[in-house]
Image: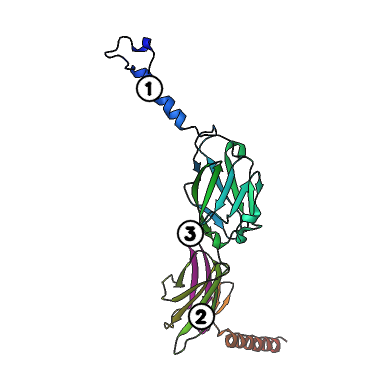
């Protein structure tokens, strides 16, 4: 109820003026936003876009409070599918290793340089393909807690592709392109040296221990006019590719030297030239008195 002097002049007794009502609502909202331990409610935020990390490198998973309050006395937990065991747990000012997932033991570091400002992060060392996916970070203060979700995308750029060439089962030429260490699943393109796409059969297999993909791709050529081909393995996530080229055997008996083609008929021609030059030299010697 408002004081009497604030109700003077109003149309009914006991009715607050607008300014009093607004003040009353504000005080009610303020009291609701304060928890029982005297601290304001908080939320937790993280980058809204997926983080990108390369296999074998490091990545930081940052989270921060909505308010500029200290998180030094809070329990901070990063986890995957379920809260326990955690990917990393920081509690009472120390890292709790007994509650850490086995696959992250020795691979994480808690970054606390801005903990007083409500900001924290966990660094993952030696990133693997199995780290790809979602993470959650939870900030707990007494009975209050809040959390958010992060997305990590892992990329692996595989080894240089290698091409093996041999005769086909019936006719033509068979070629195989191999590579390993890719993540996620790569794309494979075969082309002849003129840039025309070639049909192929590709098999991708993931390692159960590392999650990385191996590539085995085959192509059969029946066109005798094709002198060479290329195999490209592409990471759509990184927008990068690795390419191998091969010149096919038996195509006009070409011998490739420093990127230039030389026909295999050079030996008899060279011998004939040497013989003719020798004969001319002998004749010249006989003519000279």
Front residue of 80/183: it is 80
Q: Which mark is residue 248?
A: 2
Give the SS element for disc 1: helix
Residue 199 drawn at (x, y percent): 41, 76
Give the SS element for disc 2: loop
Residue 27 drawn at (x, y percent): 43, 25
Residue 114 drawn at (x, y percent): 61, 39
- In reply to whether residue 15 is colored magenta, the answer given is no
Which residue bears the numbered disc 1?
22
Residue visible at 62% across and 87% down in the picture? 271
Left or right: 165 with respect to 20?
right
Q: Is residue 277 visible?
A: yes
Mark closer to the observer (2, 1):
1
Which residue bears the numbered disc 3?
237
Query: Of label 2 and label 1, which has the lower sequence position?
Result: 1
Front residue of 267/249: it is 249
Query: Of label 1 and label 3, which has the lower sequence position?
Result: 1
Mark 1 to mark 3 CA distance (whole Å): 53 Å
Residue 115 drawn at (x, y percent): 61, 40
């Amino acid at each position: 109820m408002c004081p009497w002097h604030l109700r003077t002049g109003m149309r009914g007794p006991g009715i607050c003026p607008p300014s009093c009502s607004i003040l009353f609502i504000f005080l009610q909202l303020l009291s609701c936003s304060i928890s029982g331990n005297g601290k304001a409610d908080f939320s937790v935020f993280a980058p809204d876009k997926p983080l990108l990390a390369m296999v074998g490198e490091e990545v930081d998973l940052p989270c921060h409070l909505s308010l500029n309050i200290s998180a030094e006395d809070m329990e901070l937990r990063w986890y995957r599918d379920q809260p326990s065991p955690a990917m990393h747990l920081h509690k009472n000012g120390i890292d709790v290793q007994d509650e850490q997932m086995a696959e992250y033991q020795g691979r994480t570091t808690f970054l606390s340089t801005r903990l007083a400002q409500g900001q924290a992060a966990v660094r993952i060392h030696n990133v693997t393909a199995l780290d790809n996916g979602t993470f959650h970070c939870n900030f707990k203060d007494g009975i209050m807690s809040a959390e958010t979700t992060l997305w990590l995308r892992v990329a692996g750029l595989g080894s240089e592709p290698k091409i093996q060439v041999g005769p086909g089962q019936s006719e033509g030429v068979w070629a195989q392109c191999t590579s390993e260490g890719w993540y996620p699943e790569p794309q494979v393109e075969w082309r002849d040296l003129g840039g025309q796409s070639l049909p192929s059969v590709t098999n991708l297999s993931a390692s159960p221990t590392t999650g990385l993909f191996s590539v085995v791709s085959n192509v059969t050529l029946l066109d005798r006019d094709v002198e060479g081909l290329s195999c490209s393995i592409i990471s759509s996530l990184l927008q990068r590719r690795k390419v191998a080229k091969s010149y096919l055997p038996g195509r006009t008996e070409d011998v490739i030297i420093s990127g230039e083609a030389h026909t295999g008929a050079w030996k008899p021609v060279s011998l004939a030239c040497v013989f003719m030059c020798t004969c001319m030299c002998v004749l010249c010697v006989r003519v000279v008195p």
